[in-house]
Amino acid sequence: MMTKKSWNVIELLSKYKFWRNSVCTFSSSGEDSNITKQAVNVAQLETKEVGKAMKAYLERAREHDEFMKQQNYEFQVGKRHLANMMGEDPETFTQQDIDNAIEYLFPSGLYEKKARPHMRPPEEVFPQRKAAEFDETGRPHHFLFYTGNPNFYKLLYDIVEQINHLNKYEDSMLRKSNKPDPNLALHATGFQWLDQHTLEKKLVEEISEKNYNSFINAMERLQSLPYSYKAKEFISAYQKPLMSRTDLSDIPKLQYDKEGRAFITVYECRRKDAKGYVTIKSPGKGKVTINNNDIRYFHDVQSREQVVAYLDGDLNVFATGAGRARRVGH
Amino acid sequence: MALRSLIFNQQILNNSVPILSQFLQQNGMSQFPSYYIKPIYQKEAQYDLIKNNEAQNYAHLPVRPALVDQTCSLSHDPKISLFINYVMRGGNKALARLLVEKAFETVKRKQLEKYHKAKEEDKHKIDIDPKEIFHKAIGNVRPILQLTPIKRGGVRYQVPVPITEKRAQYLSMRWIIDAAKEKERTLHFPETLANELVAAASNGGKAVKKKQDLHRQCEANRAYAHYRWS
C-alpha cells in the first residue's frame, strides 16, 4: 500500500516531466534585458547539451525580443509623426505632450479613464514576462519553483522570517528589560496594503483571493509586533499612503483692515456643484451677508443654523450654483 | 499606423479590468470609497479624542463631508435629529422639523404654566426643559424585551428575547409618534406629540402603555423562553 506522501512525490515528478517538455506554457516575469542576457549565456554554452524545453524557450524569447523591437520602432516613428502633426520639435516631445496630443486629437467622453485612447511606450502596454526559471538542463533556479507561485511564497517566507527575527529581538530586549520606543511605533492608520492587482503586478504572478488574504493576515501580524518599526522598510514596500499629508504652509494668513480688524477671504470654496467665496471678520457683531441679503436668504431653519453654528464675527458670502442647501456648505 | 494600432488594438483590450463596477458593488451608490470614515463633527467628541491621544489616528484618514443637518451648534442633538427623521414623511424635512419644534414649544409653555401654578416647595420637581423631557420620555418608553416567532414542532411560538439598544430606541420613538398620530381630526400633531412627551416623561400615556403591554405578554410567554436556544 502506498502512503499519501509517496503519491505526492509521484505527482510532483510527473508535473516536472511535463514542465520539462513544455515549459513556456507557464513561464511568464522579469525584464527583456534579463531574457537576452540569458539567451547570450546559453548561446555561449551551446557546446553543452541543451534540453528541448530550453530550445523552445530560447526561440520564444527571441521572438518576443524581436516583437518588442518592432513595437518600439513603431512607437518612435509614431511619436515623431505626432510631434510633426502638432507642430512641435520631435526631439523634445515628452510623454506628457503625447498624452495632451491624443486627448486633443481623439476627444473621448468615456467615463473610465483607462478605456480612453492613449499612446504609451510598448514596455508599459505589453505585460512583462518572467525570465527563464531553469537552467539549460531544465533544473529550476528558485527553491520554491514547484509551488507554482515561487515569488508569492517567497514573500510569505520573508514575512515569517521578519516576524521570527523581531520576536528574537523582543526576547533579547526583554532580557535587558528594555521597552519599545512608543514614538517610533508604526501607525496602521493612513496607509493601505497594496491591492491584489498591484501585488500581482509587483510579483509578476497571479494570486488567488485566498492567497491574497493570507498575505494581508501575515503583514498585519508583522505590523502588530511591538518592534515592528525595525522592519519599517520591508513593511512600507507593501503599503501605500491613503492621502498625501496636507501642507501646513497652505493655510492663508490673516489680513487686517483700516480699523485693525482681522479678516480672511477664502476663494474657491466648493460644496458639490456650488461655488463661492467667503470673508470672515473678527471681532464682529454677528452680521451675516449672503449674496447681499441677510440670513433670511435661507428659508429653512436648518440652513440658518449651519451658517450661525460656526460663526464668531462677521460673515460675508457670495455663492452661486446648485440649490440653497448646498450653498450652506461653504 | 503604429499610433492607430497601439491605440485601438492593444490599449483598450488590455485595460478591460472592471474597476468601476467593483467599486459600485462595494459601496452602493456612494461616491466615497469604503475606507472613508464618517465625520466626527461634535466638539465634545473631538475634545475626547484629543484627551485620549487618539486624534493622531484620525489625522491622515480621508473623511466624508458632514451631512447637511450635522452641526457643532449647541442646539444640535443627534437623537432629536433622528426623531425628526422618523417624523418626516415624503422627504419633507422642513415640515417635520417645524412640527417637532412646535411640539417642543408647546411642552415648554405647558411646563412653564405648571411651574408658575405650583407651590413654592414643589417647583423644583417640575422639569421645564423640553429636551430633557424628550430624553426622559424616550428612556421610559424603551422596551427591554420583545417577542419573536419561532417555529417548533410545526407551531409558531411567540418567544421573548432580549432587544438591542438600537432597536429599543427605534421602537420607543416610533411608539411615541404613533401615539401622537392617534387623534381627532380637529387636533394638531404638535399638540398631541407634546402631550404624549410630557405623559411619557412621567411614565404615563399610550406609548408607555404599549411598552407595558409588550412586557406583560413577554411575562406570559416566559415558558417558551427556552425555545430561543433549544
Image (tube, rainbow, N blue to C red):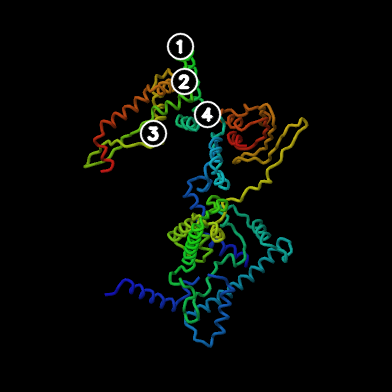
Measure the alpha-carbon separation of dots 4 and 1.
Answer: 39 Å
Is residue B163 left or right of A142 when viewed as pictured?
left
Marks 3/2: CA–CA distance: 24 Å
Q: Chain of mark 2?
A: B
Depth check, front residue: A122 or A316:
A316
Asked if residue B127 is positioned above or below residue A34 in the image, the reply reads: above
Residue under label 3: B168
Please tell me whether mark 4 sits on a helix, a strand or a loop: helix
B129 to A129, vertically: above or below: above
Q: Are marks 2 and 1 on the same chain?
A: yes
- Residue placed under numbered mark 1 in the picture: B119
Tag 2 or tag 4, which sits nearer the N-term?
A: 4
Where does label 4 land, which residue? Answer: B94
Q: Find residue A283 and report its image quarter.
A: top right
Badge 1, how many Cα within 10 Å: few under 14, some, many 20+?
few
Report the residue marked by disc 2.
B127
Disc 1 to disc 3, C-alpha distance: 37 Å
Dot 2 or dot 1, earlier in sequence = 1
Residue type, mark 2 in image = Asp
Give the foreground label among 3 and 4. Answer: 3
| Residue B186 drawn at (x, y percent) | 42, 17
Chain containing the residue with disc 3 = B
Quadrant of residue B160 within the rendered picture: top left
Of the residues shown, which amino acid type is indicated by label 4? Ala
For the residues beneath circles 4 and 2, the answer to whether they share a chain is yes
Q: Position of residue A271 (x, y in %)?
A: 60, 40
Identify the disc placed on residue A153: none
